[in-house]
Amino acid sequence: EEVLREKDNDGLTCAHYASEGGHMEVLRYVVETCGEEVLREKAKDGRTCAHVASEGGHMEVVRYAVGTCGEGLIREKDKGGWTCAHMACMGGHLEVVRYAVETCGEEVLREKD
């Protein structure tokens, strides 16, 4: 369990890397082993698992993270002021952008960084 919680030099955990790659089985294992708080962990730049999953367009991971931790996770801002919607737009992932709007309302697109 301790190894799964460790952060690298950028503050990223195993949960961040599983989210970034869209690896649901691995992410579920990490959450089952360490608890849902690993989904809320922030890297040094303030990104959560939902941020990195949104940037990569990993819809299943985004839904899982929000379903587990609540819609507040998708509203979280990183240190640059970016939400999951910003990350999804940057990555060109319309499905994730639509999910953010359906979950949080259109105001999520008006968030200022």
Image (cartoon, rainbow, N blue to C red):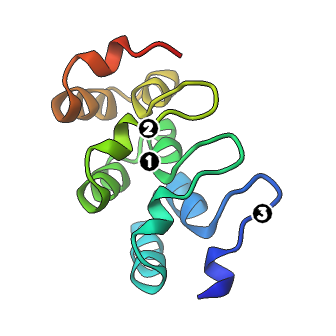
Write the residue at 47% across / 75% down.
26
Write the residue at 68% across / 40% down.
45
Left or right: 9 as drawn, with respect to 67: right
The amino acid type, in three-letter code, at marker 2 is: Glu
Labels 2 and 1 touching (C-beta < 8 A):
yes
Residue designated by label 2 = 76
Q: Earlier in the sequence, mark 3 or mark 2?
A: 3
Write the residue at 47% across / 47% down.
53
Position of 5 relative to 50 (above/below): below
Q: Nearer the viewer, residue 52 or 93?
A: 52
Labels 3 and 2 touching (C-beta < 8 A):
no
Alpha-carbon span between mark 3 and mark 2: 21 Å
**Quadrant assignment, res 28:** bottom left
Residue designated by label 1 = 50
Write the residue at 62% across / 75% down.
5
Position of 1 relative to 72 (above/below): below
Q: Mark 3: few, some, or many residues within 10 Å (few <14, many ≥20)? A: few
Alpha-carbon span between mark 3 and mark 1: 18 Å
Q: Secondary structure at mark 1?
A: helix
Residue designated by label 3 = 8
The amino acid type, in three-letter code, at marker 3 is: Asp
